[in-house]
Image: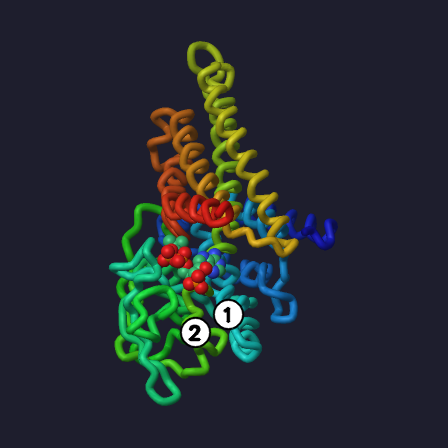
Amino acid sequence: MIRDPELLSQLLDTISRFVRERLIPNEERLAEEDAVPPELLEEMKEMGLFGLSIPEEYGGLGLTMEEEALVAMEIGKTSPAFRSVFGTNNGIGAQGILIDGTQEQKAKYVPRLATGEILSSFCLTEPDSGSDAASLRTTAIRDGDHYILNGTKRYITNGPEADLFTVMARTDPANKGAGGISAFIVQGDTPGLIRGPADNKMGQKGAHTCDIIFDNCRVPAENIIGGKEGQGFKTAMKVLDRGRLHISAVCVGVADRLVEESLHYAMERKQFGAMLADHQLIQAMLADSKTEAYAGYAMVMDAARRKDTGENVSTLASCCKLFCAEMVGRVADRAVQVHGGAGYMAEYAVERFYRDVRLFRIYEGTTQIQQLVVARNMVREAS
Ligand code: COS
């Protein structure tokens, strides 16, 4: 749903200019320094990027899913690590509190997430619990008016710098399934919350992950999201439904950028006496990438609009994530191929994007998990 087309078009223009003039020229610096330049971070805060999908009553822009998808597609046109820094505040780091939190929890934390004053993070994955999220082992045992958390979370995006964590932990050790899990809001400076060293990743330099270790970490009982035990797994799944749509939109944006890079190169370089873009085998690659990016766009827009009408889009969000993450992988592969030897060289953006996009098929649920969710929901609905 688009509430005010004119306002949205202004926002999209502003973001598009920011991407073109500020972020794209700093992509190499981001990768080399493995950090978002501090002045860009400030500009992102000033533009309201940390609160895009946070309701206006908490100081955000309150974008609908359709509006957010369009914004994510614009932001997707530059290195995904730029998005990562404010993505968690809009997405997995804030949505748990927004979807299932109490009024007090929302009022206490969300306004500061919207401005970027604090950074947030989402702790679900563990060393022995990735795709099988319900098997997580981190425990949260009640002790008076606190819970004591113990366990390790792995590959936590923004873990090294986050001020606030949404943590899924088992409050009922006798219940080994999803029903034994609760979600907690944990402040980054809580004693017993220890950050591991930053991981050395294949790509997306500038976006950081690390282990988050809970060693007898005492968290106030009032920080249990929604005030109720046993709801944490469902909260995490709802957060991921939204996150998967957002990531799909980012994949479409990245695919558009790669199509643009491929076309530009194919029109610049000559072989066999003609520009690459005049050779039919190159044209086939350009056309396939353009078509697939457009298919991703159409899927994401449809699912986002349906979500805005209140429809349960769990299946469609997984369809989008499944298609768009795989699609951008193929588009990145063709982009390298169109560039030939140059595509293997670090001085061309497509080399970096080729590594960056690999993560889309893994995080916020692997392609195989999306297949499983889609098929299981199909069977469930049919029976
Ligand atoms: N929204 C709301 N509730 C949901 C839900 C959703 N999207 N998906 C599942 N649930 C509920 C189910 O309805 C069920 O509730 P009841 O027990 O009341 O019936 C409960 O949660 C357990 O669901 P289910 O039985 O489907 O859980 P499983 O353990 O079988 O599998 C999958 C769940 C595999 C889908 C889940 O573990 C998953 O998404 N894994 C991937 C995790 C992931 O994406 N990690 C990425 C890292 S975080 S960036």
Residue 108 on image: x %, y %: 53, 78
Question: Which structural element holds mark 2?
Answer: strand
User: Which residue type carries mark 1?
Assistant: Ile
Residue 197 on image: x %, y %: 27, 63
Q: Nearer the viewer, residue 311 or 196?
A: 311
The residue under label 1 is 97
Residue 260 in the figure: left or right of residue 180 = right
Establish if 280 lies above or below 189: above
- Badge 1 crowding class, 10 Å Cα cut-off, few under 14, some 14 to 19, many 20 or more, is many
Could you tell me if the residues under marks 1 and 2 are in contact, i.e. CB atoms within 8 Å? yes
Residue 98 on image: x %, y %: 54, 68
Q: Nearer the viewer, residue 14 or 173?
A: 173
Q: Residue at x 63, y 62 (%)?
A: 62
Q: How is the image coloured?
A: rainbow
Establish if 274 lies above or below 76: above
Q: Nearer the viewer, residue 373 or 196?
A: 373
Residue 362 in the figure: left or right of residue 12 = left
Residue 78 visible (yes or no): no
Residue 154 on image: x %, y %: 30, 61
